Every structure is written in structure tokens, then in C-alpha cells.
Image: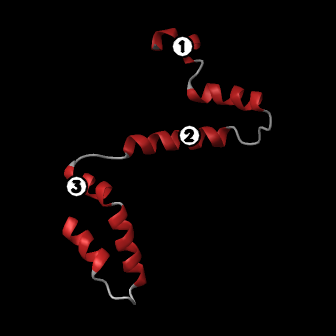
Amino acid sequence: MASLIEAVSDSVPTPLSELITLGRTLKKRAADVLAYFERPGTSNGPSEAINGRLEHLRGSALGFRNLTNYIARSIPQTGGFRPLLHPHLR
């Protein structure tokens, strides 16, 4: 993979501007790209799950202009009252 990144970033004809841009990006992010191949089985699934949850939370509190109301709407969505309402789930 390292040799492919090197080839795409160095020896590309000038008319292929998209490929030149790809090579530049791959060269900048080479450490991240190569780390993916060094650790098979890794996934960004957990971070995507958190992002999805945050998007849901943001969507459920749309339209609130008052911070207190926004917080009051957000706490139940995040399970903030769960220990008080369901003590057996701690």
C-alpha cells in the first residue's frame, strides 16, 4: 500500500488533476491509511454510533430557543433520569 501511495502521489501526468489531488491527500494521510491495514478488524462503528445518537438528540430538541428547555428535553433522551426512574438498571 505504501508503494501505491508513493506511485499515485509522484508519477501522475498533469492532465489527471483528480488523481493528483487523490495522491496528495493519500500522502498527507498515509499514516492513517497504513494503520488501517496494520490492524485488521478495526472499525469506526463505535464512533459512528455515537455520532448517530448525537444527531438524534439534536433533532429531538430542534426549535427550542431557551437553553433551559433544550436541556430539559435533552436529559430524557440521553437517559439522564434512568437511574432515578429505574434503579434496578444501574
Question: Which mark sits nearer the N-terminus, 1 or 2?
Answer: 2
Which of the two residues, 71 or 1, is positioned nearer the viewer here? 1
Is mark 1 in CB contact (under 8 Å) with mark 2? no
Q: Secondary structure at mark 3?
A: helix
> Which three-letter amino acid code belongs to the residue tagged 1?
Pro
Q: Nearer the viewer, mark 1 or mark 3?
A: 3
Find residue 76 and report its image quarter. top right
Question: Which mark sits nearer the N-terminus, 1 or 3?
Answer: 3
- Find disc 3 in the rendering and name its residue: 37
> Which three-letter amino acid code belongs to the residue tagged 2?
Leu
Residue 13: % across, % down: 33, 88
- Find disc 2 in the rendering and name its residue: 54
Residues packed near mark 1 inside 10 Å, few (<14), some (14 to 19) or many (20 plus): few
Which of the two residues, 60 or 33, is positioned nearer the viewer here? 33
Q: CA distance from mark 1 to mark 2?
A: 21 Å
**Residue 22 visible in this rendered orientation of the protein:** yes
At 40% from the left and 90% from the top, the residue drawn is 15
Total count of labels: 3
Q: Secondary structure at mark 2?
A: helix
Q: CA distance from mark 1 to mark 3?
A: 42 Å
Residues packed near mark 2 inside 10 Å, few (<14), some (14 to 19) or many (20 plus): some
Find residue 74 and report its image quarter. top right
Q: Nearer the viewer, mark 2 or mark 3?
A: 3
Q: Nearer the viewer, mark 1 or mark 2?
A: 2
At 58% from the left and 21% from the top, the residue drawn is 80
Residue 49: % across, % down: 45, 41
Q: Quadrant of the N terminus?
A: bottom left
Which of the two residues, 12 or 75, is positioned nearer the viewer here? 12
Query: Is the residue 42 above or below the residue 18 in the image?
Result: above
- Find disc 1 in the rendering and name its residue: 83
At 20% from the left and 51% from the top, the residue drawn is 38
